[in-house]
Amino acid sequence: KEQPSNGWLQIKECPDQVCCATPSQISTKHKEGNHYVLGISIQNGAYNCFRCETKGNWHEFRMKMRGSSMSTESAEETVGSGAGLHAPSSSSPSSSSSSSSFASSSASSPELFEQALPRTPQVLRWLQEERGITQQTLEAYRVGACIASFERRDHTCVTFPWFNDDSNQPVRFKLRSIESKKAMRLTTSPDNVWGIFGWNTVTDDT
């Protein structure tokens, strides 16, 4: 039901894949007192469960409802864990089994993706020949490459890091498959922090 006074759409019963997913919460969510506790913002799609305090943005809500993510088809991918993201190996760019796992390194190590780009010739060709982006621009914007899973299939992807003014490290990554435009995703952030692609190139005196 819509609550125009507070700008939220209230969902009668919380979907298990989104919130209120513990056994005790699931067994009692049908009770009238637990109805309409999940709200979705009419303005920006952000969601917030006032019962279990689960919250996130519209993209995260859709991913959870679809039951998909980069690796396990659940919506648990974050920059913090790097779940399901792999830097392509030089010998087999499309094989995640032969690649280095991003999850094994710190989330604040985008160098793994950046270093993978020169070893992934098909991504370089796509960026430089099809998109006309120079090597200098790729390095300045710290564009990289990775393997990510979409619909249970691995895709070789370009990684576009998002920065904010609080850190010189990416707060999110936009992933774009070079095979299909439909395979595109923005990773989540543990603290729900947002950023801008290219912010790292803006100087203080700009």
Image (spheres, grey):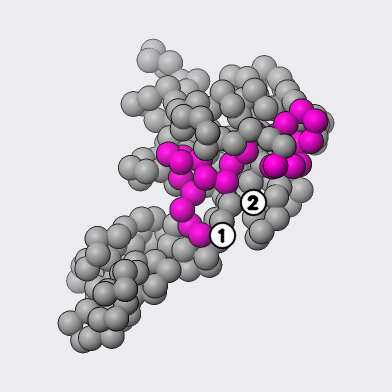
Q: Is residue 182 visible?
A: no
Crowdedness near tag 2: few (<14), some (14–19) or many (≥20) residues, C-alpha within 10 Å: many
**Magenta segment, principal secondary structure?**
loop
Residue placed at 70% from the left, 55% from the top? Answer: 153
| Left or right relative to 195: residue 137 | right
Residue bearing mark 1: 73
Q: Position of residue 176 (x, y in %)?
A: 65, 44
Q: Is residue 136 visible?
A: yes
Residue bearing mark 2: 149
Q: Is 4 colored magenta in this rendering?
A: no
Residue placed at 17% from the left, 82% from the top? Answer: 33
- Residue 163, relative to residue 59: is it above or below? above
**Quarter of the image that includes the C terminus:** top left
Residue placed at 46% from the left, 32% from the top? Answer: 107
Q: Is 95 colored magenta in this rendering?
A: yes
Quote the CA–CA distance across marks 1 and 2: 8 Å
Q: Position of residue 38 (x, y in %)?
A: 29, 70
Residue placed at 73% from the left, 23% from the top? Answer: 118
Q: Position of residue 99 (x, y in %)?
A: 68, 35
**Quarter of the image that includes the N terminus:** bottom left
- Residue 137, relative to residue 81: is it above or below? above
Does the CB distance between marks 1 and 2 fall below 8 Å? yes
Q: Nearer the viewer, residue 137 or 93?
A: 93
Q: Which residues are magenta?
A: 74-97
